């Protein structure tokens, strides 16, 4: 059974969540029951594939052992080589998922959701290294965090300290009622996005584009139409999944962060990455870009801070590109966005000195128009159609 794939899944989730809702409205904790139903739902999602089930179990056990062992080590010592080895071991299965299929080899950890669990595991190691996570963590609670079923297949990527706070906070009946209504609202938004708008765009436009235009459009116009329709389809499909995850999470008392905030109204490319797939972009910003910049600044290998920053952008978006896959169009997509970010930063610094581009409603509208077309071209690259 696919998560959020059909009405049957929602009916099952609705039935399973009834005790959670009742306990929540009465102001009582549903944590233990939520852990129990998470196991059931994971069995439904991965149970139809023995390979997927075995992969999930082995991968989770591996990550749990890695986190627990490193936390025990970090409580006594703080060696950089050991930290680096722990991070590399954590991401190794994900690297194998990307590389082995290209070599024609089977991969043991090839299951839906391996990326999101990896991001959470790496985050735990990084924050343990930084001293942000000090207290001993229950293995059951840690497994619940890694395998939290509403977000396991499509995100958003939550943070342990935020998740832990929600897990141990029992809202009053009145507060839970607000969470419940918010969760239901997100689910309906997801239904609108994925099962209506994304469905209509795909079945009434995308399947005919870019080539099957029946002489209504020229080949070039067909490509342009495909670029815009694919961009809207990608947003509504992915934002729909994310809305489902946020909605079910809130019903379970966990305020999973939202993933999209009207990205097509972004006024510039930096604003776009603060609105699009926010949990992923913020994860790469905090754990890749910022760490790279701080490391390079500390080593003083490059004195120009802007050069360091731009190298950080290239690293960030290159990794974000190959996270989607090692195919050329994903790599070019990542580097394209790195170039956009760098060009905008140069323009912004240039404009601060000369003040040629004022801030008003007209420049804002022009900025939204330019940004929208730039990101749609990026999605055109991402689709692979350009190549």
Image: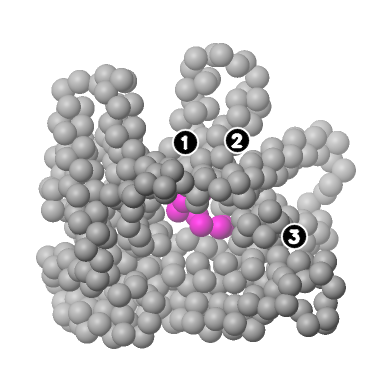
Q: Earlier in the sequence, mark 3 or mark 2?
A: 2
Horizontal side of residue 133 vs 99, given as left or right: left
Q: CA distance from mark 1 to mark 2?
A: 11 Å
Please tell me which residue is depicted at 34% across the width and 72% down the height of the picture: 3
For the residues carrying marks 1 and 2, which lies nearer the camera in this image?
Answer: 2
Coordinates of residue 73 in the picture (x, y in percent): 17, 27
> Label 3 to label 1, Cα distance in Å?
27 Å
Quarter of the image where one finds residue 24: bottom left
Q: CA distance from mark 3 to mark 2?
A: 21 Å
Residue 182 colored in magenta in the image = no
The quarter of the picture where the N terminus appears is bottom left
Name the residue tied to disc 2.
314
For mark 3, what is the residue? Answer: 373
Q: Is residue 320 visible?
A: no
- Residue 66 seen by the camera: yes
In the rendered view, would you say 270 is above or below 362? above
Vertical order, 299 against 263 (above or below): above
Residue interval drawn in magenta: 275-282
Residue drawn 46% across the image and 76% down it: 190
Whether residues under marks 1 and 2 lie with C-beta atoms below 8 angstroms apart, the answer is: no
- Main SS class of the magenta portion in the image: helix
Say which residue label 1 marks: 288
């Amino acid at each position: 059974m696919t998560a959020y794939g059909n009405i049957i899944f929602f009916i099952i989730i609705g039935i399973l969540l009834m005790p959670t809702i009742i306990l929540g409205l009465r102001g009582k904790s549903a944590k233990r029951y939520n852990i129990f139903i998470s196991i059931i739902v994971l069995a439904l999602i991965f149970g139809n594939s023995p390979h997927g089930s075995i992969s999930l179990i082995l991968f989770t056990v591996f990550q749990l052992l890695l986190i627990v062992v490193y936390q025990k080590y970090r409580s006594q010592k703080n060696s950089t080589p050991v930290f680096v080895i722990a991070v590399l071991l954590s991401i190794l299965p994900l690297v194998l998922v990307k590389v082995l299929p290209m070599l024609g080899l089977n991969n043991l950890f090839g299951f839906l959701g391996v990326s999101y669990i990896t991001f959470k595991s790496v985050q735990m190691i990084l924050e343990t290294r930084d001293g942000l996570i000090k207290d001993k963590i229950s293995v059951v609670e840690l497994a619940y965090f890694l395998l939290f079923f509403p977000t396991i297949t499509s995100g958003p990527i939550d943070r342990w300290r935020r998740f832990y706070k929600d897990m141990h906070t029992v809202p009053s009946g009145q507060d839970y009622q607000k969470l419940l209504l918010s969760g239901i609202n997100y689910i309906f938004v997801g239904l609108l996005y994925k099962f209506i708008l994304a469905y209509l765009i795909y079945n009434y436009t995308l399947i005919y584009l870019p080539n099957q235009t029946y002489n209504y459009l020229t080949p070039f116009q067909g490509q342009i139409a495909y670029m815009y329709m694919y961009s809207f389809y990608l947003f509504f499909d992915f934002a729909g999944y994310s809305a489902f995850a946020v909605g079910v999470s809130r019903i379970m008392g966990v305020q999973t962060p939202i993933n999209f905030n009207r990205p097509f109204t972004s006024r510039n490319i930096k604003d776009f990455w603060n609105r699009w797939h926010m949990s992923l972009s913020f994860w790469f910003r905090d754990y890749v870009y910022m760490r790279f910049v701080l490391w390079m600044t500390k080593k003083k290998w490059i004195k120009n801070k802007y050069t360091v920053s731009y190298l950080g952008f290239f690293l960030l978006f290159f990794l974000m590109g190959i996270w989607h896959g090692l195919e050329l169009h994903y790599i070019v997509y990542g580097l394209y966005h790195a170039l956009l970010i760098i060009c905008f930063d140069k323009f912004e610094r240039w404009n601060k000195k000369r003040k040629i581009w004022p801030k008003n409603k007209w420049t804002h509208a022009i900025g939204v128009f330019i940004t929208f077309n730039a990101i749609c071209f990026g999605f055109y690259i991402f689709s692979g159609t350009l190549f």
